[in-house]
Amino acid sequence: MARGSTRPTSRDVAQAAGVSQAAVSLVLGDKWRGRVSETTAERVREAARELGYRPNLAARNLRLGRTRTVLLVVPALTTEFFAGVYTGAARVAARHGFGVVLYPSPEGIGPARDPFASAQAALDGVIASSMAADALTAIRGDQLPLVMLDSDPEGSLGAATVNLDIADGIRRVADHLLDLGHRHFLHLAADVPSWTFEVRARELATRVGAVPGTSVRTARAPISIEGARTAAEAALATSGPRPTALVCDDDKLAAGAYKAARRLDLRIPDDISVTGLDDLALATALDPELTTVRLDSELFGERGMQALLAVLESRTPQAGDIPVELVVRGSTAPPSAS
């Protein structure tokens, strides 16, 4: 407990733990590894808890020239996916004494007003989705230590990139549908100029095109249920052989595809199979439940924050894309004989 009304100091913690003030600074600043033992570190933490000690972060940050604040730039929060990204990033940040400010780009894409008098003065670094690259440039976040999410590693603005293995997810979707016997596909593609959606289109065309007698048509749609319904309905109503499989760039587009199918009296999956990507809560609210690719959004956020901490500490971030998983549900089946 704190002694009377006097706020405990690092000297008090050092005396209670039987260590030097330097050791206290190392432990409470999370710089102790390789310098003091785990036992000593735990003793310091326990003493700080018992005394109710709280470090003066403002003074420490002034000495270090840091605000210990990170900006997470994402598209507008229209799905829970980016909420999961924030949760994962904030969890890792909190363990290292950082805060995360969430900044959604207006309307999901496009320029944005700088929310700070000077982002460069107010922030230690930025984690940004490639879908919000215009907003990132507007606030000059690309001039700060930067980690890009869902971004081409070969042309990224960031010091590091963190990606989900979207290419593998699309390959799994394509293989699943091909194995069921589908040969004619409609790709309901997000009408957003982003590397992650380019990967989806390229991998689907490559995987399906490797099988003789197949075809892929593309219809583009804004990432909204009604926009997807309009685009899917128009594409499915066109003359010519109707596709038996509809591959959607995300689950929200798939929900629009469901509405289009019902308007055209097409049964899912009897007349047409539908797949999504994300595995949002929406996927199991649809009837039949949606076959989709599960993306671990919280792990995505965790890896993004870990990569930024590595950049700030001049370390090499963890390499390798984050694995994804195909979840097969009731929206896919072999094509009907008709």
Image (spheres, rainbow, N blue to C red):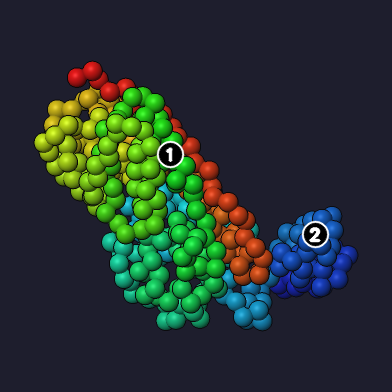
Q: Earlier in the sequence, mark 2 or mark 1?
A: 2
Q: Among all residues in the image, which is located at the extreme top? A: 337
Find residue 62 and report its image quarter.
Answer: bottom right
Q: Which residue is mark 1?
A: 171
Residue at mark 2:
41
Taking the image as shown, residue 101 lies to the left or right of residue 20, namely left
Nearer to me, 80 or 177 = 177
Amino acid residing under circle 1:
Arg
Q: Where residue 173 appears, x then y in whole percent?
A: 40, 35
47 to 134, vertically: above or below: above
- Could you tell me which residue is drawn at 25 percent across and 29 percent down? 244
- On screen, residue 13 versus residue 163, left or right, reads right
Classify residue 334 by image quadrant.
top left
Q: Is residue 277 visible?
A: no
> Between 36 and 319, which is closer to the camera in this rendering?
319
**Which of the 4 image quarters holds residue 114?**
bottom left
Label 1 environment density (alpha carbons within 10 Å; few <14, some 14–19, many ≥20) = some
Instruction: Report if residue 120 is visible in the image.
Output: yes
- SS type, badge 1: helix
**Which residue shows up at 29% across the image and 33% down it?**
214
